[in-house]
Image (spheres, grey):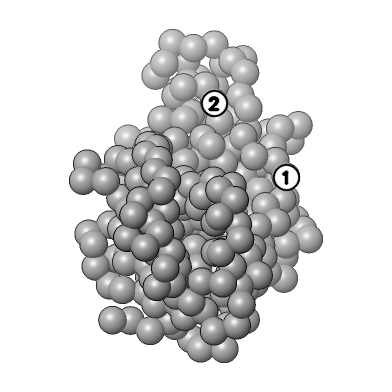
Amino acid sequence: MSTPVAAMPAGTEVPFGKILESMARRACQDTGASPTRALVATVVAVGPDGRLHEAAETLRALGDSGTIRGILISEGDSPAPPACVAGNTVSFHGLKTSYVNNAVAALRLSSLPTLVWWRGGSAETLDALADLADRIVLDEEQPEPIWARAVTLFDDSAFSDLRWARLTQWRALTAHLFDVPEVQRSAPHATRLTIRADDRVSAELFAAWLTSSIEFTPGLSVDIVDGGGAPIQEIRLGDDEQELVLCLAGNRKCVESGVSRNGQRTASRVVSLGDQRLTTLISEELRIRARDVAFERSVQTLLKREQPTPRLL
């Protein structure tokens, strides 16, 4: 047997024309499930080899549960690299850029949604996949360049980002605080937004969402403070009289939100941060069909800002 593709060392190398047959056979062997079991979507993970190992584990878990057909692709120079099949997932190592969309079109479940999990690659490949995908979930360590490209494709496919997904509870809690009448009246006049975070990009994305959703009076300062040991540790919005505070709890599994006025807490709430595992996040993204206008607006706001980064303390 030939050496398996790096992202799926447990897989078996098969000719392209035998991929679907091999998937059905391996799925029965590995899980005991019927090859005709219902699948709900195709998930295509694209990225460099170093970022596909984690994606392979996620897709294999989803595929074994009978949820998706998985396709893993790293780009290269080969028009016909070996295909490696493990269960209901297939992997291609070093596939030529111009052949990526052909491979996806041939192997996806054509009558069901296709989600692209983008972990890195060429802009040309993203362009091609936007024509095939119902949804593209971006997941790059330094996402600004691909965000700039994605903005031009918003009319072709629904886009999101895993950082955005991880901010869901932070955004929801902030929105709930604005249901408090006194917050509605005073928060737009806040003079400062301070975010303590280890992930600057997540902090910037949250700040872009907030400032593009609320019409603040001119002069709001945005500071991102490095630290806290978490992607987002604490968010503070207010002035010398009132402050909205969201803070990660000590167990790192919950977020506490509250409103303080003149040093006195007037409202408080604690909610679970939610399951942050990749398998759960991708599963949640599979449930979303419509365009995320708030995400699109936030990214556009972030890219249009005059200064390259907020001030780091």
Disc 1, SS: loop
- Mark 2 or mark 1, earlier in chain: 2
Q: Is residue 162 above or below residue 277?
A: below
> Residue 194: which disc?
none
Residue 310 image position (x, y, % from top left):
43, 81
Q: Residue at x 66, y 48 (%)?
A: 135
Q: Amino acid at mark 1?
A: Ala
- Estimate how packed mark 1 is, as few (under 14), some (14 to 19) or many (20 or more) residues with alpha carbons within 10 Å: few
Q: Quadrant of residue 271?
A: top left
Secondary element at tag 2: loop
Quarter of the rendering occupied by the N terminus: top left
Residue 184 position (above or below residue 110): below
214 is higher (above) or lower (below) than 288? below
**Horizontally, is 68 left or right of 242 in the view?**
right
Residue beneath disc 1: 290
* Residue 67, numbered circle: 2
Instruction: Name the foreground residue: 133 vs 77.
Output: 133
Q: Is residue 298 visible?
A: no
Three-letter amino acid code at the position of disc 2:
Thr
The percent position of residue 307, horizontal first and vertical second, equals: 51, 88
- How far apart are the alpha carbons under marks 2 and 1? 20 Å
Q: Residue 38 location, x and y as percent?
A: 62, 18
Q: Is residue 120 left or right of residue 213?
A: left
Q: Is residue 65 left or right of residue 234?
A: right
Viewer-nearest of discs 2 and 1: 1
Residue visible at 57% across and 41% down in the picture? 285
Foreground residue, 172 or 1? 172
Assess disc 2: are there few (<14), some (14-19) or many (≥20) residues with their C-alpha within 10 Å of its C-alpha. many
